[in-house]
Image: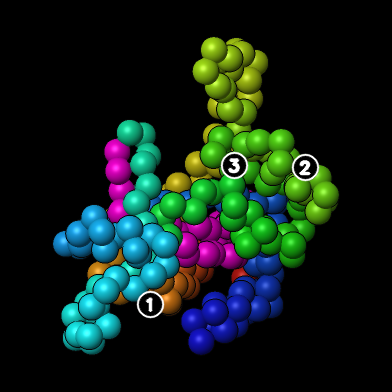
Amino acid sequence: MIEELFEKFESYLRTQGLEARGGQMIDATLVLVPRQRISREDNKEIKENRMPDGWDDNPDRLRQKDLDPRWVKKNGINHYGYKNNICIDVEHGFIRRYAVTPANIHDSQMPLMLLDPENTDDYVWADSAYAGECFENLLNLVGFESCIHDKGSRNHPLSDTAQERNRIKSAIRACVEHVFGCMTIPMGGRMTRKIGLERNKAWWGLMSLAFNFLRYLLRADRGFALA
């Protein structure tokens, strides 16, 4: 139902002349959840998608245990939860697609779920987490033009030219960070207490829809031409 509502408002935006234009930006942010008291043995079973022994004997307890979030290390810090992935268009800044996954799913695995084929332009902006020959080949195969940040590696730092290219790309790509900033502060923060992947998909789908409502009202208040 949430996805149907999201698509319904997307159709409304198109009738108002606000279809996706200018290319698209994809990015992801961590969705933290409360850490649970789970033993190492039980956690190992959960990671292998098996129910720990004895858990199904107590339905009340099981309802309070979230088996779907995962651990991930980012910038040397361990995080526990999910990941909210979004795609926005460059010209209007609306969320056009979204996907919620466990936190351990790497950003580079998400483009096929996020790329918007209805955008009128072929450019795709993303940070260096999406860099790599495999993703570049995928973009070429489906007809997109890569504007992804260059990525350095150990003993192979970025050249001055590559760093300058990244700075130019960042001036455009920064808009997607503003979306997460809006969700983090005025819309209630990144932590969720919803239990289970399906509930979190619904919650963050509503968050994305609410952001688009606010974005639309902001454009209308500022006097942008709407059909």
Q: How far apart are marks 2 and 1 (CA)?
A: 34 Å
Residue that label 1 marks: 199
Residue that label 3 marks: 130
Question: Which quadrant holds residue 58?
Answer: bottom left
Instruction: Please give the name of the residue rendered at 65% of the width and 78% of the height, measured from the top-left corner.
Output: 11
For label 2, the SS is helix
Instruction: Please give the name of the residue rendered at 51% of the width and 49% of the height, measured from the top-left corner.
Output: 106
User: Which residue type does callout 1 highlight?
Assistant: Arg
Label the magenta part by its dominant secondary structure: strand
Q: Is residue 85 magenta?
A: yes
Q: Which is nearer the N-term, disc 3 or disc 1?
A: 3
What residue range appears in magenta? 77-101
User: Which residue type does callout 3 highlight?
Assistant: Tyr
Q: How far apart are marks 3 and 1 (CA)?
A: 27 Å
| Most distant residue in the front direction | 53
Horizontal side, residue 107 vs residue 42: left or right: right
Task: Look at the picture and state if 159 lies above or below 27.
Answer: above
Q: Nearer the viewer, residue 14 or 170?
A: 170
Residue 104 x/y as whole percent = 44, 52
Task: Look at the picture and state if 119 lies above or below 71.
Answer: below
Residue that label 2 marks: 137
